Amino acid sequence: MATTQKSKGIVSYARYFTALLGILVLDQATKLAVIANIPWERGNPTYHFGGQNEPIVVIPGFFNIVHITNEGAAWGMLSGQTYLLSSIAIIALFAIWFFRSYLGFNSKWGQIALGMFTGGVIGNLIDRIAYGHVVDFLDVYLPIVNYRWPAFNIADCGICIGVAIYIILVMASDLQKKRA
């Protein structure tokens, strides 16, 4: 029985580390490709087609690949606060690991959600340490409302999707408790 419990724990951590490494490797690989192939522009994109910072158009009028740097957090908040943002990321990583038994490591989707979140945090932390900013490259324009979403990256996707899954899990758990 002890062997079964131990192997069950390894599987649990395997899901977490698989999600973490999946996001982290994809994030860093895509950022390296962008750095190697697209000149960069500090801050949010202002495009002058035909110029140095011309985006790679994937879906005309909707989705481009760009090379933007962000010294802040989401939407450029706390811009220039690299040490503060890096410290917050490190504290969050330690907190997730320290409180993992309370955060859902006992469920398959909890492990996946936390792994995705952690992989995203580490991906952006690597950028802050290596470059002093985060490399963003996914550029979405919403023509219906004439709005350009701030450029983002795979790490940001991992963070957002991980948080979304986690919120759904918490809400579903609360709903089950209310029904019981």
Image: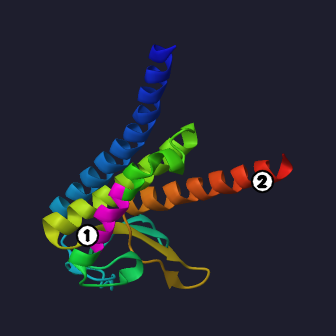
Q: Is the magenta stretch mostly helix, strand or loop?
A: helix
Residue position for label 2: 175
Question: Under tag 2, what secondary structure?
Answer: helix
Q: Do the residues labelled 1 and 2 touch (CB within 8 Å)?
A: no
Residue bounds of the magenta highlight: 85-94
N-terminal-most mark, 1 or 2 = 1
Does residue 40 appear to the left or right of 156 in the view shown?
left
**How far from the left and from the top, in percent, is residue 92?**
37, 62
Tag 1: Cα neighbours inside 10 Å, few (<14), some, or many (≥20)?
many
Numbered mark located on residue 86 in the image:
1
- Comparing 81 with 60, the one in front is 81
Magenta stretch holds residue 41: no
**Residue 15, visible in the rendered structure:** yes
Numbered mark located on residue 70 in the image:
none
**How far from the left and from the top, in percent, is residue 24?**
31, 49
Which residue does the image show at 49% across and 62% down from the upper left? Answer: 160
Which residue does the image show at 28% across and 83% down from the upper left? Answer: 43
Q: Relative to 171, is 39 above or below?
A: below
**How far from the left and from the top, in percent, is residue 15?**
45, 35
